[in-house]
Amino acid sequence: MNTIALSISEPSAAPQNVTGKNSSSRSILVMWDEVPADEQNGIITGYTITYHSQTENDNGNVQVNGSVRQTELTNLKEYVKYYITVFASTVKGDGPAIDPIVVRTDQDSKYYFTD
């Protein structure tokens, strides 16, 4: 009986085309494309999105399933610049993270209109 041994390791490249946009004064939508197929080195089991602010003590990370290509970071601080990275994982470990993208949350409106 012939068996084929597949070499599984962590991804050798980062997710592609990572973008982020502020979706409110306290949230940012992060989107990405998968790691190139020839650099996945196995099945992508998940993505980790990290965020931190250099001016506020606000940082954290979100983990999502390997089939997901976007997530919304919520409960952020208003009008703050966040440095965001994304990396993929296989059962063998984490791949490299992208160079951080920088996204600022929106500023709450100072004006309130009523009908």
Image (cartoon, rainbow, N blue to C red):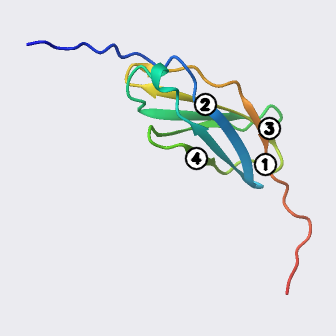
Which is nearer the N-term, disc 3 or disc 1? 3
Considering the image in quadrants, where does the C terminus appear? bottom right
Q: CA distance from mark 2 to mark 4?
A: 15 Å
Identify the amino acid type marked 3.
Glu
Identify the amino acid type marked 2.
Gln
Which is nearer the N-term, disc 1 or disc 4? 4
| Side of 67 where 77 appears, left or right | right
2 vs 4, front mark: 2
Residue drawn at 87 percent across, 64 percent down: 109
Q: CA distance from mark 2 to mark 1?
A: 23 Å
3 vs 4, front mark: 4
In the picture of the structure, the residue carrying the numbered disc 2 is: 16
The reply to whether callout 3 and callout 4 are in contact (CB within 8 Å) is: no
Q: CA distance from mark 3 to mark 1?
A: 13 Å
Which is nearer the N-term, disc 2 or disc 1? 2
**Image disc number at residue 105:** 1
Residue drawn at 80 percent across, 31 percent down: 54
In the picture of the structure, the residue carrying the numbered disc 3 is: 56
Identify the amino acid type marked 4.
Thr
In the picture of the structure, the residue carrying the numbered disc 4 is: 71
Q: Residues within 10 Å of mark 1 (few under 14, many from 20)?
A: many
- Tell me the SS state at disc 2: strand
